[in-house]
Amino acid sequence: EDHPKENYELIDKKHQIVAAADGAECNDKTDKVKSKNEEKEMLDEFNAWQSKVGMDATAIEASLTSTEKYGLMFREKIDPFWSVFAIMEERRKLEAIEDANDEVDIEALEREKANLELLALEEGDLLGTNPQPEDLPRQRYVYQREKFNLRASKKRRKLTGENWVEKIDG
């Protein structure tokens, strides 16, 4: 007979726990609604303030506490944080500026070269001729023969050791 009484007490305790949990859920839901309403009110207040004041740095700094002002000054002037991305982006921008300054105007160089050739022709330092078409195959043969001779002499110097240099391991 003791057992059924204990079972009723256990069942009663379970009902109390479930009821408390339901009440807590209701409280949680009302707390969530209240917090959402508070967030919305704060956001509306901030938007009204921002539309009235705007993004004025002096107004923002005036709204900071002295500790926040010190922290802001410390991060901006004394020990600024530079991320790896920011450093790489800055380096890329500097390289792009340097490359833009180093770009060569090919057309200007070609014009300058043509002017120098004309000047050399006028002074007699450069001979300009219009070769006859029948002379061109002979010139090509001479060029190829000289090129072959240069390659052969380069190979000969490598094999015989004429262009070798003594080096001391240190």
Image (tube, rainbow, N blue to C red):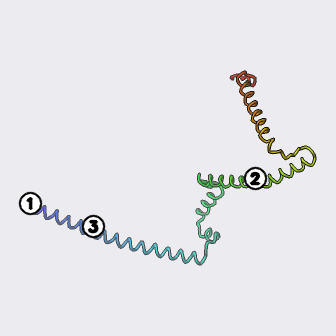
Viewer-closest of 40 and 68: 40
Q: What is the three-letter code of the residue carrying label 1?
A: Asp
Q: Are marks 1 and 3 in contact (CB under 8 Å)?
A: no
Q: The residue tagged with tag 2: helix, strand or loop?
A: loop
Disc 2/disc 3 C-alpha distance (Å): 78 Å
Q: Earlier in the sequence, mark 2 or mark 3?
A: 3
* Residue indicated by mark 3: 21
* Residue indicated by mark 1: 2
In this rendering, the label closer to the viewer, 1 or 2 = 2
- Look at the image and tell me whether residue 10 can be seen: yes
Q: The residue tagged with tag 1: helix, strand or loop?
A: helix
Which class describes the residues within 10 Å of circle 3: few (<14), some (14-19), or many (20+)? few
Disc 1/disc 3 C-alpha distance (Å): 29 Å
* Residue indicated by mark 2: 104
Q: Quadrant of residue 64?
A: bottom right
Q: What is the three-letter code of the residue carrying label 2?
A: Val
Residue plotted at (28% across, 70% down): 23
Viewer-closest of 36 and 82: 82
Residue plotted at (8% across, 60% down): 2
Q: Earlier in the sequence, mark 1 or mark 2?
A: 1
Residue 69 rendering spot, x and y as whole percentages: 61, 63
In this rendering, the label closer to the viewer, 2 or 3 = 2
In the image, taking residue 84 as reference, residue 1 lies left or right, namely left
Q: Quadrant of residue 165?
A: top right
* Figure check: 158 above or below 138: above
* Figure check: 52 above or below 102: below
Viewer-closest of 29 and 71: 29
Residue 84 rendering spot, x and y as whole percentages: 59, 51
